[in-house]
Image: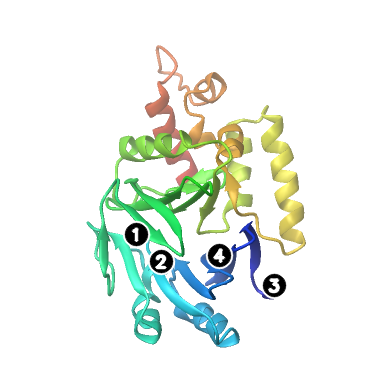
């Protein structure tokens, strides 16, 4: 295993590594081991990928998958495409550098033998997409769903983000969640404030805290774990709704209003 990467063996032929970038980004590196082919997700910086390829000269980068247009996700795309000839996939309705195949909701692409469905999940940005591999239970969701959290609303509305998260929450529970930031510990501290009586949040906070002290990363997560410990997926839970009730409310807020208040609270937490 690469010293600066976490390897997750999905099948004997497919590995996924986390290549750290910047202060808290991960570039996901998918590897078809027998064929020595690879792909990357959201390479905000070309350097970690180029260094990995230099250390593995018999490997070929074939594809670059992009979820949205923010610089920390696309900053390395053009350089990687120029260096390797990799095909660039990304959202059709955002400006993605060197893009070869713009993607719409519901499209399917095949990368390294993986069939991935494109899910339009606006909120963080308006054109944000995720890549879902049903056969391998994989989700590359960029900055929409985080471990124990969700992305800020830079372009979309609370209603859009809430709907996007509900769409992801409906995926099978065993789906592995490959988001792109190491925000889990701070997200869990907020989750505990939102649900102080949730024992699973407390246990997860202790576990992730120990992992981070050991230098381990906290990803990938799973949909079923998020449903139990991520307040942004639990805005219809009575305890969360009650926690977000304001003195002027004549009734408990509905799920969307609860989500809106959670996101506003997290922005200043």
Dots 2 and 1: beta carbons under 8 Å? yes
**Count of numbered labels shown in the rendering:** 4
Q: Would you say the residues marked 3 and 4 are in contact, meaning their CB atoms lie under 8 Å apart?
A: no
Q: Position of residue 218 (x, y in %)?
A: 65, 54
SS for tag 3?
Answer: loop
- Name the element at disc 4: loop
Neighbourhood count class around disc 2 (C-alpha, 10 Å): few under 14, some 14–19, many 20 upward:
many
**Can residue 268 be seen in the rendering of this structure?**
no
Q: Nearer the viewer, residue 82 or 128?
A: 82
Residue at the spot x=49%, y=26% of the render?
244
Q: Position of residue 40 (x, y in %)?
A: 46, 68
- The residue wearing badge 4 is 24
Query: Are discs 4 and 1 less than 8 Å apart at CB?
Result: no
N-term-proximal mark, 4 vs 1: 4
Q: CA–CA distance between discs 4 and 2? A: 12 Å
Q: How many residues crowd around disc 4 within 10 Å: few (fewer than 14), some, or many (20 or more)?
A: few
Residues under labels 3 and 2: Cα distance? 24 Å
Alpha carbon distance from label 3 to label 4:
20 Å
Residue 211: assigned label: none
Separation of marks 4 and 1 at Cα, in angstroms: 17 Å
C-alpha gap between disc 3 and disc 1? 29 Å
Does label 3 or label 2 sit earlier along the sequence? Answer: 3
Q: Residues within 10 Å of mark 1 (few under 14, many from 20)?
A: many
Query: Residue 119, position in %: x, y?
Result: 35, 46
The 10 Å Cα crowd at callout 3, few under 14, some 14 to 19, many 20 or more, is: few
Q: Residue at x 53, y 78 (%)?
A: 48
Dot 4 or dot 2: first in sequence order is: 4
Q: Which mark is residue 73?
A: 2
Q: Which residue is mark 3?
A: 1
- Find disc 1 in the rendering and name its residue: 68
């Amino acid at each position: 295993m690469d010293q600066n990467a976490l390897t997750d063996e999905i099948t004997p032929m497919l590995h996924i590594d986390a290549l750290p970038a910047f202060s808290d980004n991960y570039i996901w590196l998918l590897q078809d081991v027998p064929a020595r082919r690879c792909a990357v997700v959201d390479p905000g910086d070309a350097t970690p990928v180029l260094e990995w390829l230099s250390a593995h000269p018999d490997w070929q980068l074939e594809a670059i998958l992009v979820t949205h247009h923010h610089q920390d996700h696309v900053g390395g795309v053009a350089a990687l495409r120029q260096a390797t000839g990799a095909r660039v996939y990304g959202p059709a309705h955002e400006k993605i550098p060197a893009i070869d195949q713009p993607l719409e909701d519901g499209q399917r692409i095949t990368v390294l033998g993986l069939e991935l469905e494109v899910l339009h999940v606006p909120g963080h940005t308006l054109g944000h997409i995720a890549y879902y591999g049903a056969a391998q239970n994989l989700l590359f969701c960029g900055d929409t769903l985080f471990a124990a959290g969700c992305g800020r609303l830079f372009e979309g509305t609370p209603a859009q983000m809430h709907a996007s998260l509900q769409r992801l929450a409906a995926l099978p529970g065993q789906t592995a969640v490959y988001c792109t930031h190491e925000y889990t510990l701070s997200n869990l501290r907020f989750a505990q404030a939102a649900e102080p009586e949730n024992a699973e949040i407390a246990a997860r906070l202790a576990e992730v805290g120990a992992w981070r002290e050991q230098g381990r990363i906290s990803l990938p997560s799973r949909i079923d774990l998020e449903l139990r410990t991520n307040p942004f997926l639990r805005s219809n839970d009575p305890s969360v709704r009650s926690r977000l009730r304001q003195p002027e409310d004549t009734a408990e807020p509905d799920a969307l209003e609860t989500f809106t208040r959670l996101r506003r609270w997290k922005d200043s937490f």
